Image (cartoon, coloured by chain):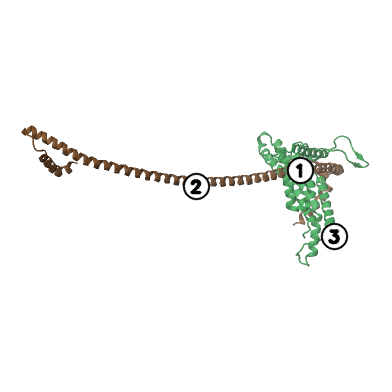
Chain colours: A brown, B green
Amino acid sequence: MKLKVPLVILIFWFETILFAAEAGMPQLDSKYWLSQSFWLILIFVILYLSISKFFIPKIKDNLDDREKKIKENLDKAKEFSELADKKNLDYENEISKAKKEVIKIITESKKQLDKSISQKKEGFEKELEKEIKKAENEIANLKKNSSESVKILAEEISEKIIENLTGEKLNNSSIKASVNEISKNKMSKYL
Amino acid sequence: MAANPMSQFKVYRIGPEIKFGNIDLSFTNASLFMLISAFTICLFLYFSSKQKSIIPSRLQLISEIFYNFIAKMISDTAGSKAKPYFPFIFTLFMFILLCNMIGMLPYSFTVTSHIIVTLIMALFIFAAVTIIGFVKHGFKYLSIFVPKGVPVVLLPLITIIEIISYLSRPVSLSVRLFANMMAGHTMLKVFGSFVISLGLLGGWLPLSFSVALTGLEILVAFLQAYVFAILTCIYLNDALNLHH
């Protein structure tokens, strides 16, 4: 097959060269073949030279420049991103350090606060106890004193009442004795 | 007859007759359209590579796409050894593409629809590839005609076939391009004349056909330029990397 096609074309071609020019295929009219070949070669060579010497280096330079620039920019970007990563790490380290310090400070101050609070509480409790004792003493004193004075008052009042009721004076010691007796029984009830 | 579909391929002289003895080198319409194609390529490449911006403009992007397209084609088919031939392949591809494309304009002339033009290019490529092969490999280049792994009995026949197929390369290369361009343009012309002859009532069908064919021909114009270039790369690959 590979052989057949060109052969057929070749036979067809030679036949048509002989007969087709008059039949209307201007391609096979050999009058301008040399002219066409000459101008083709001339124009193609000039085009080739201008493209290979002038245009292709320009396009290639431009493409290379772009690739270089993109690579440079990528490298720079990579550098910057590495720097940013480093900075970020530093920053995180700093933050974690600061956090640790803050926790330390907080626990320390808490301890101190607790200590001072407990100290104050103790002092306060002691004072309170003292105060309570004092008050208790006072109350006890008052009780003692008041029972005495109540007794005297009761003696006086009972003497006066008896005097007013009976019109005669009773023996002081007997009143005292009875008041004492009554108060012994009833005083603890009221005081 | 004005509607002769072949009259579009006629070559005629423009300007004065240039003659050296018996040799007629007059400037013709074919030469004019070669010049227009080459000039268009130069203009395009000049304006597309004028400003070197990192973010390419549209024109610059087109030229870079062509550049990368052809560079990839060469490296895919012929490897890195073919790099020195990049400008030639690039020129070849651009020239054929522009000749084909400019030929698609109405009233223009298609340079590549002439067998002599494509044959000159194909013969040059054939000769260059053969010379490169012999320069790179010496007489070992002849081993391209002897494929490996073929039974000894078949070897003489295969070798003859290989030689014929090698020698028919320029013919197939040139005829492929020429025949494609000629057939397409003839068909366009035929359908165009149908539009006129069928008139306002019946002309619509061939007209729509004509539109479709124009699209097809633009595709063929690109495809044939690509095929021509890639076959050149393949031949170059045979000469550079002798792997038979």
Q: Residue furthest right?
A: B21
In whole angstroms, how far apart are the C-alphas of marks 2 and 1? 63 Å
Q: Nearer the viewer, residue B216 or A163?
A: A163
Question: Foreground mark, 2 or 1?
Answer: 2
Residue B40 — which label?
none
Q: Secondary structure at mark 2?
A: helix
**Percent position of residue B72, x then y:** 72, 49
Which residue position holds label 2? A104
Which residue position holds label 3? B139
Badges 2 and 1, same chain: yes
**Percent position of residue A160, x then y:** 11, 33
Badges 3 and 2, same chain: no
For mark 1, name the chain. A
Q: Quadrant of the C terminus of chain A?
A: top left
Which residue position holds label 1? A61
For mark 2, name the chain. A
Question: Foreground mark, 3 or 1?
Answer: 1
Question: Foreground mark, 3 or 2?
Answer: 2
* Residue type, mark 1 in image: Asp
